[in-house]
Image (spheres, helix red, strand yellow):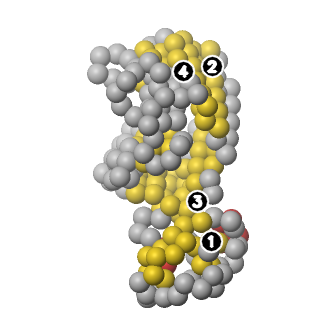
Protein backbone atom coordinates (compact mmCIF):
# COMPACT_ATOMS: atom_id res chain seq x y z
CA UNK A 1 0.00 0.00 0.00
CA UNK A 2 1.05 3.60 -0.53
CA UNK A 3 0.01 6.12 2.13
CA UNK A 4 0.67 9.85 1.93
CA UNK A 5 -0.17 12.88 4.11
CA UNK A 6 -1.96 13.10 7.47
CA UNK A 7 -0.57 12.90 11.00
CA UNK A 8 -0.13 9.11 11.34
CA UNK A 9 0.32 6.53 8.63
CA UNK A 10 -0.63 3.19 10.30
CA UNK A 11 -1.48 2.49 13.94
CA UNK A 12 -2.33 -0.84 15.55
CA UNK A 13 -5.09 0.50 17.83
CA UNK A 14 -8.04 -1.93 18.16
CA UNK A 15 -6.53 -4.65 15.97
CA UNK A 16 -5.46 -7.11 18.66
CA UNK A 17 -2.92 -9.89 18.41
CA UNK A 18 -1.06 -11.51 15.52
CA UNK A 19 -0.80 -8.33 13.47
CA UNK A 20 1.33 -8.08 10.33
CA UNK A 21 2.30 -4.69 8.85
CA UNK A 22 4.36 -5.43 5.77
CA UNK A 23 5.32 -3.98 2.40
CA UNK A 24 3.85 -0.49 2.80
CA UNK A 25 5.24 2.79 1.49
CA UNK A 26 4.39 5.67 3.84
CA UNK A 27 5.51 9.21 3.07
CA UNK A 28 4.90 12.94 3.49
CA UNK A 29 3.32 12.87 6.93
CA UNK A 30 3.09 16.07 8.96
CA UNK A 31 2.49 16.99 12.60
CA UNK A 32 -0.97 18.27 13.55
CA UNK A 33 -1.12 20.71 16.45
CA UNK A 34 0.77 19.35 19.45
CA UNK A 35 0.88 15.80 18.06
CA UNK A 36 3.92 14.26 16.43
CA UNK A 37 3.59 12.62 13.07
CA UNK A 38 4.38 8.90 13.10
CA UNK A 39 4.74 6.62 10.09
CA UNK A 40 3.84 3.38 11.92
CA UNK A 41 2.69 3.20 15.55
CA UNK A 42 2.47 -0.12 17.40
CA UNK A 43 0.60 0.60 20.61
CA UNK A 44 -0.95 -1.21 23.58
CA UNK A 45 -1.87 1.20 26.34
CA UNK A 46 -5.25 -0.15 27.40
CA UNK A 47 -7.79 -2.88 26.73
CA UNK A 48 -9.11 -1.25 23.57
CA UNK A 49 -5.61 -0.98 22.08
CA UNK A 50 -4.39 -4.49 22.76
CA UNK A 51 -1.43 -5.73 20.73
CA UNK A 52 0.06 -7.90 23.45
CA UNK A 53 1.09 -10.71 21.12
CA UNK A 54 3.30 -11.17 18.10
CA UNK A 55 3.11 -8.02 16.02
CA UNK A 56 5.38 -8.14 12.93
CA UNK A 57 6.45 -4.89 11.25
CA UNK A 58 8.56 -5.87 8.24
CA UNK A 59 9.72 -4.54 4.90
CA UNK A 60 8.07 -1.12 5.08
CA UNK A 61 9.46 2.14 3.71
CA UNK A 62 8.75 5.26 5.79
CA UNK A 63 9.86 8.61 4.42
CA UNK A 64 9.46 12.28 5.37
CA UNK A 65 7.58 12.31 8.68
CA UNK A 66 7.75 16.06 9.17
CA UNK A 67 7.68 17.02 12.83
CA UNK A 68 7.82 13.46 14.08
CA UNK A 69 9.16 9.92 14.12
CA UNK A 70 9.38 7.20 11.53
CA UNK A 71 8.11 4.51 13.87
CA UNK A 72 6.84 4.34 17.44
CA UNK A 73 6.73 1.21 19.63
CA UNK A 74 4.37 2.13 22.43
CA UNK A 75 3.81 -0.16 25.43
CA UNK A 76 1.71 0.69 28.46
CA UNK A 77 3.30 3.51 30.44
CA UNK A 78 3.48 3.08 34.21
CA UNK A 79 1.78 -0.30 34.32
CA UNK A 80 2.23 -3.98 33.48
CA UNK A 81 -1.28 -5.09 32.48
CA UNK A 82 -0.84 -4.42 28.75
CA UNK A 83 2.83 -5.08 28.12
CA UNK A 84 3.62 -4.95 24.43
CA UNK A 85 4.89 -8.50 23.96
CA UNK A 86 6.95 -10.06 21.16
CA UNK A 87 6.86 -7.23 18.62
CA UNK A 88 9.28 -7.79 15.74
CA UNK A 89 10.53 -4.71 13.85
CA UNK A 90 12.75 -6.00 11.07
CA UNK A 91 14.09 -4.98 7.66
CA UNK A 92 12.35 -1.61 7.40
CA UNK A 93 13.74 1.52 5.72
CA UNK A 94 13.16 4.78 7.60
CA UNK A 95 14.48 8.05 6.16
CA UNK A 96 14.10 11.83 6.18
CA UNK A 97 12.10 12.09 9.41
CA UNK A 98 12.34 15.20 11.58
CA UNK A 99 13.11 13.31 14.80
CA UNK A 100 14.32 9.78 15.58
CA UNK A 101 13.81 6.92 13.18
CA UNK A 102 12.38 4.58 15.87
CA UNK A 103 11.11 5.68 19.29
CA UNK A 104 10.31 3.15 22.04
CA UNK A 105 8.05 4.03 24.99
CA UNK A 106 6.47 2.21 27.93
CA UNK A 107 6.57 -1.43 28.95
CA UNK A 108 7.78 -3.86 26.28
CA UNK A 109 8.92 -7.48 26.41
CA UNK A 110 10.67 -9.59 23.79
CA UNK A 111 10.96 -6.65 21.41
CA UNK A 112 13.31 -7.25 18.47
CA UNK A 113 14.61 -4.33 16.39
CA UNK A 114 16.90 -5.81 13.77
CA UNK A 115 18.11 -5.26 10.21
CA UNK A 116 16.53 -1.84 9.73
CA UNK A 117 18.11 0.96 7.66
CA UNK A 118 17.63 4.36 9.29
CA UNK A 119 18.94 7.27 7.25
CA UNK A 120 18.95 11.07 7.07
CA UNK A 121 16.75 11.67 10.11
CA UNK A 122 16.73 14.66 12.45
CA UNK A 123 17.48 17.30 9.84
CA UNK A 124 14.21 19.25 9.88
CA UNK A 125 14.21 20.10 13.60
CA UNK A 126 16.76 21.42 16.07
CA UNK A 127 14.98 20.45 19.31
CA UNK A 128 14.29 16.99 20.68
CA UNK A 129 16.36 13.85 20.46
CA UNK A 130 17.19 12.92 16.91
CA UNK A 131 19.20 9.73 17.39
CA UNK A 132 18.31 6.95 14.96
CA UNK A 133 16.81 4.91 17.82
CA UNK A 134 15.48 6.56 20.99
CA UNK A 135 14.39 4.93 24.25
CA UNK A 136 12.06 7.22 26.21
CA UNK A 137 12.31 7.68 30.01
CA UNK A 138 9.18 5.50 30.42
CA UNK A 139 10.80 2.42 28.86
CA UNK A 140 10.88 -0.88 30.75
CA UNK A 141 12.30 -3.28 28.15
CA UNK A 142 12.77 -6.91 29.18
CA UNK A 143 14.32 -9.50 26.83
CA UNK A 144 14.94 -8.85 23.17
CA UNK A 145 17.45 -7.72 20.57
CA UNK A 146 18.66 -4.42 19.14
CA UNK A 147 21.16 -5.62 16.57
CA UNK A 148 22.19 -5.44 12.93
CA UNK A 149 20.67 -2.06 12.14
CA UNK A 150 22.33 0.39 9.76
CA UNK A 151 22.43 4.11 10.62
CA UNK A 152 23.61 6.67 8.08
CA UNK A 153 23.72 10.44 7.61
CA UNK A 154 21.81 11.68 10.65
CA UNK A 155 21.77 14.69 12.94
CA UNK A 156 21.53 14.79 16.71
CA UNK A 157 23.70 13.85 19.65
CA UNK A 158 22.85 10.39 20.99
CA UNK A 159 23.54 9.98 24.70
CA UNK A 160 24.29 6.24 24.82
CA UNK A 161 26.55 5.65 21.85
CA UNK A 162 26.89 6.63 18.21
CA UNK A 163 23.52 5.18 17.25
CA UNK A 164 21.16 4.84 20.21
CA UNK A 165 19.98 7.29 22.84
CA UNK A 166 18.72 5.77 26.09
CA UNK A 167 17.11 8.08 28.63
CA UNK A 168 18.78 7.73 32.03
CA UNK A 169 15.47 6.60 33.52
CA UNK A 170 14.91 3.81 30.97
CA UNK A 171 15.24 0.25 32.30
CA UNK A 172 16.71 -2.30 29.87
CA UNK A 173 17.15 -5.90 31.05
CA UNK A 174 18.45 -8.93 29.12
CA UNK A 175 18.49 -7.15 25.78
CA UNK A 176 21.29 -7.99 23.35
CA UNK A 177 22.58 -4.78 21.83
CA UNK A 178 25.26 -5.13 19.16
CA UNK A 179 26.57 -7.36 20.99
CA UNK A 180 26.23 -5.93 24.52
CA UNK A 181 23.74 -7.10 27.13
CA UNK A 182 22.31 -4.16 29.08
CA UNK A 183 21.30 -5.14 32.63
CA UNK A 184 19.28 -2.92 34.93
CA UNK A 185 21.27 -3.75 38.08
CA UNK A 186 24.83 -4.73 37.10
CA UNK A 187 25.40 -7.54 39.60
CA UNK A 188 26.12 -11.20 38.90
CA UNK A 189 22.65 -12.30 39.97
CA UNK A 190 21.06 -10.12 37.28
CA UNK A 191 22.90 -11.77 34.38
CA UNK A 192 20.82 -14.10 32.18
CA UNK A 193 21.05 -17.74 33.29
CA UNK A 194 18.67 -19.53 30.89
CA UNK A 195 19.39 -20.22 27.23
CA UNK A 196 22.95 -18.95 27.41
CA UNK A 197 23.81 -20.32 23.96
CA UNK A 198 21.90 -17.42 22.40
CA UNK A 199 24.04 -14.95 24.39
CA UNK A 200 27.36 -16.36 23.16
CA UNK A 201 29.75 -13.43 22.59
CA UNK A 202 27.57 -10.96 24.52
CA UNK A 203 29.31 -8.65 26.99
CA UNK A 204 28.24 -6.86 30.14
CA UNK A 205 29.83 -5.73 33.39
CA UNK A 206 29.16 -6.44 37.04
CA UNK A 207 30.00 -4.59 40.24
CA UNK A 208 30.08 -7.41 42.78
CA UNK A 209 32.52 -10.02 41.40
CA UNK A 210 34.43 -11.92 44.08
CA UNK A 211 37.53 -12.31 41.85
CA UNK A 212 39.27 -10.68 38.89
CA UNK A 213 40.92 -13.71 37.26
CA UNK A 214 40.66 -13.57 33.48
CA UNK A 215 38.40 -16.22 31.91
CA UNK A 216 37.21 -17.58 35.25
CA UNK A 217 33.49 -18.11 35.83
CA UNK A 218 32.21 -14.99 37.53
CA UNK A 219 30.59 -15.22 40.97
CA UNK A 220 29.01 -12.53 43.11
CA UNK A 221 29.54 -11.58 46.71
CA UNK A 222 32.56 -9.34 46.23
CA UNK A 223 33.24 -5.71 45.41
CA UNK A 224 35.15 -5.96 42.12
CA UNK A 225 33.94 -4.17 39.01
CA UNK A 226 34.81 -6.35 36.02
CA UNK A 227 33.72 -6.88 32.41
CA UNK A 228 32.19 -10.26 31.67
CA UNK A 229 31.49 -12.23 28.52
CA UNK A 230 29.16 -15.13 27.81
CA UNK A 231 30.89 -18.16 26.27
CA UNK A 232 27.59 -19.91 25.60
CA UNK A 233 27.75 -21.91 28.82
CA UNK A 234 28.86 -19.47 31.54
CA UNK A 235 29.56 -15.82 32.15
CA UNK A 236 33.35 -15.43 32.49
CA UNK A 237 35.52 -12.52 33.49
CA UNK A 238 36.82 -10.79 30.38
Do the numbered discs 3 and 1 sit on residues whose CB atoms are within 8 Å?
A: no
Query: Residue tagged by mark 2?
Result: 25
Dot 4 crowding, Cα within 10 Å, few <14, some 14–19, many 20+: many
Could you tell me how far apart the alpha carbons at marks 3 and 2 are, in whole angstroms? 32 Å
Q: Which of the two labelled residues, at mark 2 and mark 1, occupies the earlier sequence position?
A: 2
Please say if the residues under marks 3 and 2 sit with CB atoms less than 8 Å apart. no
**Nearer the observer, disc 3 or disc 2?**
3
Q: Which mark is residue 96?
A: 4
| Residue ID at (59%, 86%) | 213
The structure residue drawn at horizontal position 48% and vertical position 15%, both measured from the top left corner, is: 29
Instruction: Identify the residue under disc 1.
Output: 229
Q: Is residue 215 above or below residue 134?
A: below
Mark 2 lies on a secondary structure that is strand
Instruction: Compute the Cα span from label 2 to label 4.
Output: 14 Å
Q: Is residue 88 visible?
A: no
Q: Which residue is mark 3?
A: 180
Q: Residue at x 52, y 32 (%)?
A: 101
Among numbered discs 4 and 1, the one appearing first in the sequence? 4
Question: What element does badge 3 sit on?
Answer: strand
**As drawn, is 153 to the left or to the right of 104?**
right
Q: Quadrant of residue 127?
A: top left
Amino acid sequence: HGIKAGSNGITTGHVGRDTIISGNYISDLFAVGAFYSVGISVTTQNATKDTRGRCLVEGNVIAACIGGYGMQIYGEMGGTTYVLDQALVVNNTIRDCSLSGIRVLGNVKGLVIEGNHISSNGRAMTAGNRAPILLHSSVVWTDGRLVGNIYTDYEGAPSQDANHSFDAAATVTNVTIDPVVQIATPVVASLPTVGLSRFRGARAYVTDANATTFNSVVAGGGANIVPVMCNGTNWVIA
